[in-house]
Image: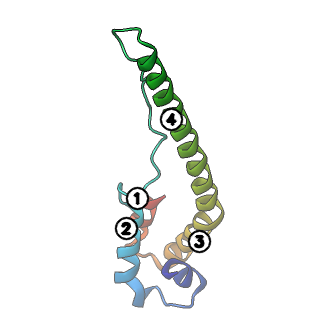
Amino acid sequence: EVLGAVADGAIPLESADAVLGDALHILSSTEIRLSAVQRFSNAAAGGDDDEDQRQQASAQTSNMVAQAAKSKFLSQIVKRNVMQNVVPTLAALKSVMERAHSPLLGALMRTL
């Protein structure tokens, strides 16, 4: 909301420097960036060819495949949301910051 308000001119850039800097720092942190879909290894068990072990390995593999598909689906939804909602706001904010020669422009570019 802060980024959009500054980009729209509802909040003057000069009076929102601290909050804007904090928001950009949070958005650029590695902890909240989109992560790639986790790779997984096959859960095939070595050793005995016991039927129970094969069924358990098969169930584990199926679970891992389902988790990977779910993760990929959610990642695509989040990426689409970022592209539709966040990127246009950051682009508008970049224009405002360039016109004002804001020192926070570097933080904005790290966010992108």
Distance between the alpha carbons at the discs numbered 4 and 1: 26 Å
Distance between the alpha carbons at the discs numbered 1 and 3: 18 Å
Task: Choose mark 2 or mark 4, whichever is in front.
Answer: 4
Distance between the alpha carbons at the discs numbered 3 and 4: 38 Å
Residue assigned mark 3: 89
Q: Is residue 87 left or right of residue 17?
A: right
Q: Quadrant of residue 78?
A: bottom right
Q: Is residue 21 left or right of residue 8?
A: left
- Sequence-wise first label, 1 or 3: 1
Residue assigned mark 4: 63
Distance between the alpha carbons at the discs numbered 2 and 4: 33 Å
Q: Which amino acid lies under the numbered mark 1 shown in the image of this protein?
A: Ile
Task: Choose mark 3 or mark 4, whichever is in front.
Answer: 4
Observer-nearest residue: 7 or 100?
7
- Sequence-wise first label, 2 or 4: 2
Q: Which amino acid lies under the numbered mark 2 shown in the image of this protein?
A: Ile
Distance between the alpha carbons at the discs numbered 2 and 3: 16 Å
Residue assigned mark 2: 26
Element at badge 2? helix
Residue 32's disc number? 1
Q: Where is residue 16? Give x, y as percent.
A: 41, 86
Residue 63 versus residue 18 in the image, above or below: above
Q: Where is residue 101? Give x, y as percent.
A: 45, 75
Distance between the alpha carbons at the discs numbered 2 and 1: 8 Å
CB under 8 Å between callouts 2 and 1? yes
Q: Where is residue 39? Give x, y as percent.
A: 44, 32
How many labels, in total? Answer: 4
Element at badge 1? loop
Q: Residue at x 35, y 12 (%)?
A: 46
Q: Residue at x 55, y 84 (%)?
A: 5
Element at badge 3? helix
